[in-house]
Amino acid sequence: MTDQQDVYSERSYGGETIGFGSKPGIAVVDFQLGFTDPSYALGGSPLVQRAVENSARLLKVARESGVPVATCYTGYNSKRDMPYWKISAVMEDLIDGEAATELDPRTYVPDYDVAMRKSGASMF
């Protein structure tokens, strides 16, 4: 073990193992109205529409089979809460509570899915 690893071990990093679960799950990222609804500046591209439609079919089967589904959306408390964006539609539309941050009902089932907000590009 290196000195750097010792420092982390002394502070209990790696003290617990996580590993893989016993069944698959599905992560759905950014299928929110601001990206899926053509009435928004960033919404409705043909590629995104196909992804939503295909994902909806997959998610239906997954839920029927008991597969966990986690979904996230991008949103911010205010413009001050955002990183610097050069995309005005992000700055205007992706404020929490605005319709653009609502998850697309074609892929989101509130009584089943775990949903979370993210404020960065990655869900992970």
Image (cartoon, rainbow, N blue to C red):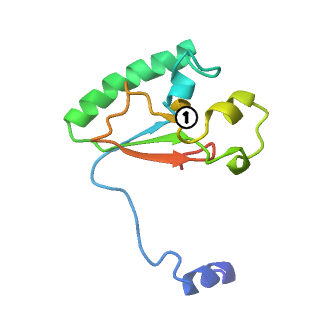
For residue 26, which quarter of the picture? top left
Name the residue: 32% across, 39% down.
Answer: 110
Disc 1, SS: loop
Task: Provide residue 70's location: percent of width, then percent of height.
Answer: 39, 44
Q: Is residue 116 left or right of residue 65?
A: right
Image quarter (top left, top right, bottom left or bottom right) of the N terminus: bottom right
Q: Residue at x 68, y 32 (%)?
A: 92
In this rendered view, identify the residue nearer to me: 57 or 114.
114
Relative to residue 55, is residue 39 depicted above or below? above
Is 78 on the left-hand or right-hand side of 16?
right
Q: Name the one closer to the observer, 64 or 115.
A: 115
Query: Percent from the top left, x then y, of residue 5?
Result: 62, 78
Q: Quadrant of residue 47?
A: top right
Q: Say which residue label 1 marks.
A: 98
Q: Residue 61's image quarter?
A: top left
- Residue pictured at 39% horizontal, 20% vertical: 54
Q: Nearer the viewer, residue 109 or 78?
A: 78
Q: Position of residue 23 (x, y in %)?
A: 28, 48
